[in-house]
Amino acid sequence: PLAYDWLSLNLGAGVKAPVYHGCLPIKPLEPVLAALAALPIGAAVRVVGSGPAAVEVSLALAARGFAVSLSGDPERTFWQGFRGALNSAGVELDEAAQGCDVALELHCTGSWGPEWLAQSGLATDGRGRVLTGADLRSVNDSAVFASGDCGVIDGQSRPPSGVWAVRAAPVLAANLQRAVSRRPLQRWRPQPHALQLLGDGRGRAWALWAGRQLGPSRRIWRWKQHLDERFMAMLRPPQMASDQPMA
């Protein structure tokens, strides 16, 4: 147990998957990469999911030479809008696939808050994310804040996305300072939509915004690469002073 006066939860989210040999959730990514590296090119890989992640992962795996099938919930048909691209890439669409009759099965079935949050006493939504007010503070524990994929503002349901996590950061930083000094907290109103850029694994990408779809095009792919590389550059530590020649 850890004692605290104020607690800020920024835990990310996970993906649930059945527990049997050869089946993995797409998060965390490291075990997935290790499993793929152990497979020969041409091995059969099934992707389970009905959203953007399932489409993008399927196309990326097909571009790398795997025999890919995509199994989704027929009631959630996001990937139906990408049927042409999936067929062209050689991805087999199989809604009813069950069991692990492939070399690897990857589940891209949506993000959930860490399981222990549901037993923490904090109020959570149907996907195990901490319910907060617009000030990012838990609705039933004023000493706890939550942001990013593990939290969601009560009454403003939205899918997990890095866009909202990044936009929440300045509000969270300000409110932690205000909470410590006992000042009124800021309120945050998230943007209603987030831009999604989906790569096809072959140097093209789509832009998705508020139900509209543009692409695929190489220009959007270059835009996606620029945004991704710029964000990753922010996370790289600065060059250590010890790397410089000593006097």
Image (spheres, rainbow, N blue to C red):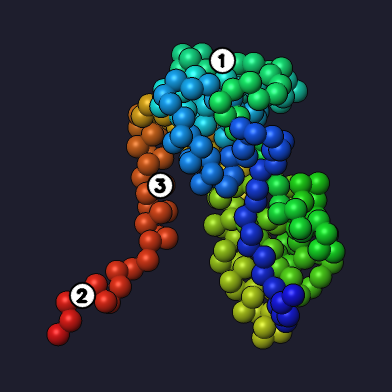
- State the residue at coordinates (63%, 21%): 101
* Residue 2 figure quarter: bottom right
Q: Amino acid at mark 2?
A: Gln
* Residue 77 figure quarter: top right
In the rendered structure, which disc, 2 or 3, sits on the residue that comes first in sequence?
3
Q: Is residue 26 above or below residue 153?
A: above
CB within 8 Å, label 1 to label 2: no
Residue identifier under label 3? 227
| Secondary structure found at label 2 | loop
| Secondary structure found at label 3 | helix
- State the residue at coordinates (57%, 20%): 69
Residue 92 - label: 1
Q: Amino acid at mark 3?
A: Leu
* Residue 64 figure quarter: top left
- State the residue at coordinates (46%, 30%): 39
Residue 244 - label: 2
Q: Is residue 128 above or below residue 244?
A: above
Let me know if residue 213 appears in the view.
no
Camera-side mark, 3 or 1 = 1
CB within 8 Å, label 3 to label 1: no
Distance (Cα) linking label 3 and label 1: 31 Å
Task: Please name whichever residue, 28 or 234, is drawn nearer the observer in this view of the structure.
Answer: 28
Q: Is residue 115 above or below residue 146?
A: above
Location of residue 55 in the rendering, given as x and y in whole percent from the top left corner: 55, 28
- State the residue at coordinates (67%, 83%): 180
Distance (Cα) linking label 2 and label 3: 30 Å
Location of residue 94 in the rendering, given as x and y in whole percent from the top left corner: 64, 16
Task: Please name whichever residue, 64 or 196, is drawn nearer the observer in this view of the structure.
Answer: 64
User: Seen in the image, is 36 located left or right of residue 71?
Assistant: left
Task: Please name whichever residue, 119 or 5, is drawn nearer the observer in this view of the structure.
Answer: 119
